[in-house]
Image (cartoon, rainbow, N blue to C red):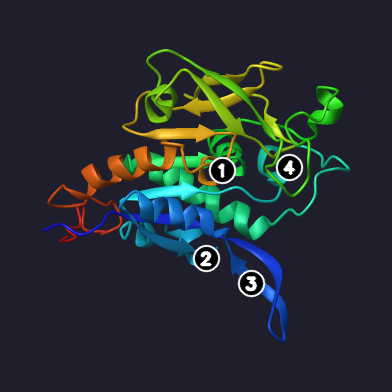
Amino acid sequence: MAGRPVIGLCAAIERARWGAWDTPAHLLPREYADAVQRAGGLALLLPPDPAAVADPDELLDLLDGLILAGGSDVGPATYGAVPHPETKGVSPERDAFEVALAQRAIERDLPFLGICRGMQVLNVARGGSLLQHLPESHGHTEHRRTSGSFDGNDHLVRLADGSLAARAAGEQVHRALSHHHQAVDRVGEGLVVTGHADLDDLPEAIELPDRRYVLGVQWHPEADETSRLIASLVAEARDYAGRSTRASSSTGNGGASVVAR
């Protein structure tokens, strides 16, 4: 009997306090792992790893699906821009790790979901750029009305008929929990915008039509127990895991490496 599909969850590097300790930690809100586990997946936390930047296959060989989670702002250096004064919390180590994983996961056709920051990383990994501060570019704070909470931070998103985003959400008009001040600007190579915010037409979903499952959403499905998004990714990963072998170009012998499940 096949085991649960393994879903990699990229972690942040943040200062944290617990007990007597106050120190940098690798962390991720538990809602991400909870959502993966509810859907029947095995959640694997992935801290930034410099070695994986050079060789993502060593890590990706372990996975059946990948989720890039929300978090701090993506560094403008990754898309050739000058930092805005409101761009904060940048982690070059995390940026390099996640961009490398995203690029190689796409090449391998590994099921991939980018959430909030993760959608922005997906866009940057494909050569796109970001708007760094929506209150300045769009003149309002509707995408992050309350800092540090999803309470009152919901709005409607329109999803294109027949899109992966609509299939994953199970509907074309979706209530999204939002908490961001940056967004997709120039769309990356091959990506298609398939979701827009009803309130200002901001891109809310992007996908790569020539891959089995590459999706980025600007909202937070992990914070909504009624959302189908993460379950959709886990289902696709289960199908991926059901293959008898995994192919990797990292073997160095001109062939595929075979990993028994």
Indicate the position of residue 147 as horizontal and vertical percent values.
Answer: 78, 45
Residue 25's label in the rendered image is 3
Secondary structure of the residue carrying numbered label 2: loop
Residue lying at 19% horizontally and 60% vertically, measured from the top left: 259
The answer to the question of whether label 2 and label 1 lie on touching residues, with beta carbons closer than 8 A, is: no
Q: Nearest to the eye among marks 2 and 1: give it.
A: 1
The answer to the question of whether label 4 and label 3 lie on touching residues, with beta carbons closer than 8 A, is: no
Can you say whether 198 is above or below 41 in the image?
above
Q: Is residue 139 left or right of residue 168?
A: right
Q: Residues within 10 Å of mark 1 (few under 14, many from 20)?
A: many
Residue 118's label in the rendered image is 1
The answer to the question of whether label 4 and label 1 lie on touching residues, with beta carbons closer than 8 A, is: no
Secondary structure of the residue carrying numbered label 3: strand
Indicate the position of residue 86 as horizontal and vertical percent values.
Answer: 85, 43
Secondary structure of the residue carrying numbered label 4: helix
Q: Nearer the viewer, residue 254 or 216?
A: 216
Name the residue type under label 2.
Answer: Asp
